[in-house]
Amino acid sequence: MNQMITVEITTIMGLKALMGGNKDQSLTLSDGATVAEALDQLCKTYGLPLHERIFNDAQQLNPGIVVFVNGCVIFALDGLETPLQDGDAVLIFPPVGGG
């Protein structure tokens, strides 16, 4: 039987609204799942508006979207292929404008 892991997903601002207003939620994945698989599962759950906000046509993160695993930006790790472990904390941070 395939082992499962649970990661904690946190989103803020506009992304939170696209995920049913839930800032924090648990996501159950197969052991060895990657950040890309976690994001894909979220997009399957919440639909095309979330997918279009996170990913571009090449299935890469849209400009300004930053993902952290346990406080470390994934680009300093293995990007979307960063493996997740049980209990990891994932933060999806949307683009922030200012001025």
Image (cartoon, grey):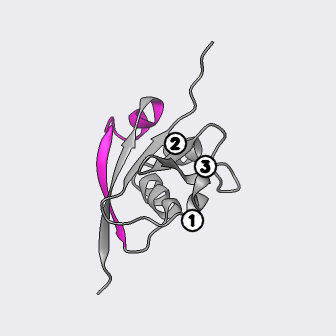
Q: Nearer the viewer, mark 1 or mark 2?
A: 1
Of marks 1 and 2, which one's residue comes earlier in the chain? Answer: 2
Quote the CA–CA distance across marks 1 and 2: 23 Å
Of marks 1 and 3, which one's residue comes earlier in the chain? Answer: 3
Residue 81, which numbered label? 1
Q: Which residue is painted at 58% across and 41% down in the image?
A: 65
Q: Which residue is painted at 49% across and 49% down in the image?
A: 72
Q: Which quarter of the rendered picture does the C terminus lie within?
A: top right
Residue 1 at x, y percent in the picture:
29, 87
Is residue 67 a member of the stretch shown in magenta?
no
Check contact, mark 1 vs mark 2: CB within 8 A. Answer: no
Apparent side of residue 22 relative to residue 56 in the rendered image (left or right): left
Apparent side of residue 75 relative to residue 58 in the rendered image (left or right): left
Dot 1 amino acid type:
Glu
Q: Residues within 10 Å of mark 2 (few under 14, many from 20)?
A: few
Dot 2 amino acid type:
Pro
Q: Which residue is mark 2?
A: 49
Residue 55, which numbered label? 3
Magenta range is: 14-30
Q: Which residue is painted at 47% across and 31% down in the image?
A: 14
Q: Is residue 72 above or below residue 84?
A: above
Q: Secondary structure at mark 1?
A: helix
Q: Is residue 4 above or below residue 14?
A: below
Q: Residues within 10 Å of mark 1 (few under 14, many from 20)?
A: some
Q: Which residue is painted at 70% across and 56% down in the image?
A: 58
